[in-house]
Amino acid sequence: MKTNLLGLDAAGLAGFFAELGEKPFRARQVLQWVHQRREGEFSRMSDLAKSLRDKLTEKACVQAPAIVGDTAASDGTRKWLLKVDGANAVEAVFIPETRRATLCISSQAGCVLDCAFCSTGKQGFNRNLTTAEIVGQLWLASKLVDTRISNVVMMGMGEPMLNLDNVIPALRLMLDDNAYGLSRRRVTVSTSGVVPEMDRLRDECPVALAVSLHAPNDRLRDRLVPVNRRYPLRELIAACNRYLEKAPRDFITFEYVMLDGVNDSDTNARELAAIAKQVRCKYNLIPFNPFPQSGFHRSSDERIRRFASVLQNAGITVTTRKTRGDDIAAACGQLAGDVADRTRRSANRVVAIKEVHA
Ligand code: SAH
Ligand code: SF4
């Protein structure tokens, strides 16, 4: 079995080179070749000794997921369907904007948390992605687009907090100056609120945090985001405040999906305003992306505007996520089933990708 170097952060690579009997600076050189220059062939790493190149070819590889779908939208959004094994594929979505370019990536195939409005959750959990599969999404996208990717959001398929063993080394590579060199403020992990793991991320690799709130009280949140039954709002807000002690930004982004007649009343907006008194936060309203048999509908544009204005009048910063890439069904985390099935599903779906305001 060859070692896939895409899955090793700086410390991991240093360990691998030590085992080969090579000096630490060689590990750094290879880190740069692989991530900065996106070189996958050791034979082309021209400043390494021939003997080392041969040794690496024999013992290691640089292997990203296979691209099985590549679609571009009229607005420049681009979506890749990536096969990670015979039965599973995940999505990565590239979102160019005027002042930044964001890549939305996945952390798991499927998700165990089963939020009521999420198609990924409806399909159940298949498996954790490896570090190589997580970083591989950024590696591939960086190779395929001309623009430098300035932001990464972990808002594709899966719950990153339930795969931190693999997510943390991937984040370290994103931040490493010898790899992608992204600012901590421009790498965002999104969670539905797995409290103990939020503390772990804070201690081991604090990056910007988005929390999928989606409901302003426990009664409603228990229904929409079932993990709330385990970690209710009071505990979630306390965890957010602990996270802020070490976070690169001084606020949490609360994501709030707008579901017609479910969580979009003026009363709900006032309840959210009360939460904003307990933790420094910004709200990001997400118009619901419908999928078959979801049982939910998107709130009207008028309702979303009114809801946002109640929050704004309370002095809270609110953004409403724009719908991007909807002509190519570019919703992060809306895929499930086998690869063939997924391709068909995503082709049929009218959806939108997520945009975080960084
Ligand atoms: N598991 C993590 C990250 C992936 S989901 C989390 O839940 O935060 C990324 C965001 O998309 C979350 O805020 C999620 O609630 C939201 N989302 C899921 N399904 C959606 C849908 N059908 N329409 C709009 N947003 C959705
Ligand atoms: Fe999982 Fe996030 Fe979907 Fe909930 S919203 S089921 S946590 S991917």
Image (cartoon, helix red, strand yellow):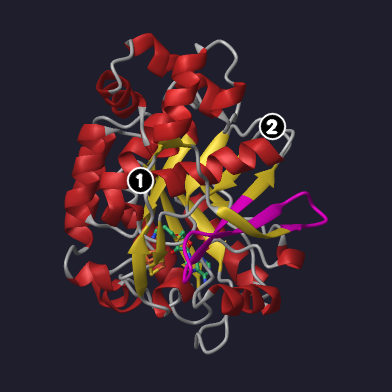
- How would you rate the neighbour count of disc 1 (Cα within 10 Å): few for under 14, some for 14-19, many for 20 or more? few
* Observer able to see residue 311: yes
Label 1 SS: loop
Q: Quadrant for residue 124, please give it.
A: bottom left
Of residues 260 and 137, which is closer to you in this image?
A: 137
Q: Which residue is drawn at 66% across and 69% down?
A: 301
Residue that carries the numbered disc 1 in the rendered image: 1
Which residues are the magenta region? 71-93
Q: Is mark 2 on a helix, strand or loop?
A: loop
- Residue at 64% in and 69% down: 351
Q: Which residue is at 31% across, 79% downward?
A: 223
Quadrant in the picture for the C terminus? top right
Question: How many numbered dots are placed on residues in this image?
Answer: 2
Picture coordinates of residue 312, whole percent (x, y): 52, 50
**Quadrant position of ligand 2:** bottom left
* Disc 2 target residue: 99
